[in-house]
Amino acid sequence: MVESEAAEGKPVARYLEIELWLREQTRTGTPGAVLPSEAELAAQFGVSRMTARQAVQNLAQEGLVERRRGSGTYIAEKPHHRREGILASFTEDMRLRGMTASSTLLDASLRSASVAEIEALDLADDAKVVSIQRIRRGDGVPQSIERAVLPTSCAAVLAADLEHGSLHAALHAAGHTPMIAQSWISARMPTPGEARHLSLPGQREPLLVERRIIRDQDNLPVEFTESAYVASRYVIDATFRITDPPVRPAGR
């Protein structure tokens, strides 16, 4: 590790020295605060601008700093962590963080189901579905674009306030209480439309994409959702158990 090398008197690469200093600024500083420019860092540490740029780029890739073209480098907002093992609606998730959830409704309609939706919700081949698409916000900051698909037996949710209320609460009121979810997570870059809706500069910010199927109290699939989160603003925590730990040699 860099810290131990420094403690042992070993030379530390200059860009790592700058990284350590910048990490401390992001740890103790205020999100949105401006950081020294590459030219200022180069002068402060007596290195080339290329060396300073490498340090800044490394932290930008980790989501610790935000580079704004023509403006400067800023301490990034701290990402929100979602606790593992708990099926909470986005509204409840934001409330637990002390934040206010809100949404912009992009679509709420009935349409024909796709092949993937038919399979996920166990529908007939010619079935229709309830389609709901929203921009989800925490304290006004866009966190994700959510695309939810439900069977027509849940069509009563279309009468609910889906901009200020919870879809899960609307499902419960309609007699379908969300009970268990199966999810899988991947990552991708945003489309131009997603970048615009999520207030992302260009299309360089990756998205953390969670797809999940939710079943109700009768074990019936009632929701098939894709939520595309801004990776630097939202983190999903997970703990894994090692099933086959290595066997320790005898006598040790």
Image (tube, rainbow, N blue to C red):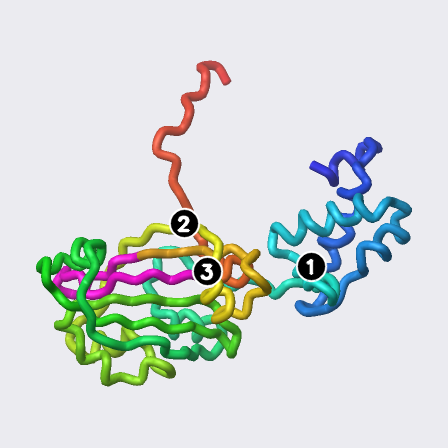
Give the residue at x 85% y 55%. 39
Q: Residues within 10 Å of mark 3 (few under 14, many from 20)?
A: few
Mark 1 residue type: Arg
The one of 35 and 243 positioned closer to us in this rendering: 35
The one of 170 and 188 positioned closer to us in this rendering: 188
Upstream in sequence: badge 3 or badge 1: 1
Q: Main secondary structure of the magenta part?
A: strand
State the residue position of label 3: 191
Q: Is residue 216 magenta?
A: yes
State the residue position of label 2: 186
Q: Quadrant of residue 152?
A: bottom left
Give the residue at x 76% y 49%. 53
Q: Residues within 10 Å of mark 1 (few under 14, many from 20)?
A: few
The reply to whether discs 2 and 3 touch (Cβ–Cβ < 8 Å) is: no
Give the residue at x 62% y 50%. 61
Alpha carbon distance from label 2 to label 3 = 15 Å
Mark 2 residue type: Ser
Upstream in sequence: badge 2 or badge 1: 1
